[in-house]
Image: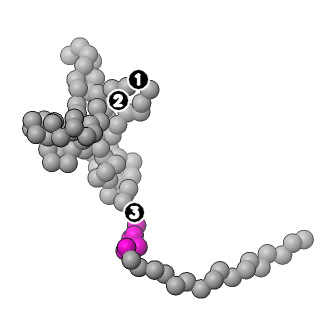
Amino acid sequence: MAANCKDCGSEIRWFQPMRPDGKPMPVDVSPDPDEGTIRRHISGPSDKTILRGEALKGDALIRARADGERLWMHHGATCSEQKPFNPKPAGLSLNLPPARPSRRRFR
């Protein structure tokens, strides 16, 4: 099932999770052989094909990459709108003045 990301507008695909209690996974449209972590499984009859995704970790991920499997990238890792805004560099300290007390009036 193709759709567009609500944050960045890129085209994405939705994989159903392998576990019945999980949420559908948004993945990039094309597989990424170097950085991908999601294995695709196709199930169901040809007229109602279901794409399922399995998140790989550790040894399973290393073996899949070594075997040249087509792995997809979770869209949250590549979405341009999900990146942190201008993070503070490591080792930098901010010397900010103390906060001013609020001047709320009570009635």
Label 2 element class: strand
**Is 45 left, or right, of 69 in this rendering?**
right
Q: Is disc 3 in contact with disc 2, using a CB cutoff of under 8 Å?
A: no
The magenta stretch spans residue 88: yes
35 relative position to 80: left or right: left
Between discs 3 and 2, the one toward the N terminus: 2
Please identify the residue farthest to the right as the structure is shown. Answer: 107
Label 2, label 1: how far apart the Cα atoms are: 7 Å
Question: In the rendered image, which quarter contains the N terminus?
Answer: top left
What span is colored magenta in the figure? 84-90
Q: Please tell me whether the stretch drawn in magenta is mainly helix, strand or loop.
A: loop
Q: Which residue is mark 2?
A: 17
Packing grade of label 3 (10 A; few <14, some 14-19, many >=20) is: few
> Which is nearer the N-term, disc 1 or disc 3?
1
| Identity, as a three-letter code, of the amino acid under mark 2 | Pro
**Mark 1 Cα shell of 10 Å, populated few (<14), some (14-19), many (≥20):** few
Identify the residue at image location x=34%, y=37%. 25
Please state the horizontal and vertical placement of residue 28, each as a whole percent of the image.
25, 44
The residue identified by callout 3 is 84
Colour scheme of the picture: one colour
Image quarter where the C terminus lies is: bottom right
The residues tagged by marks 1 and 3 sit, at their Cα atoms, a distance apart of 31 Å
Residue 38 sits inside the magenta stretch: no
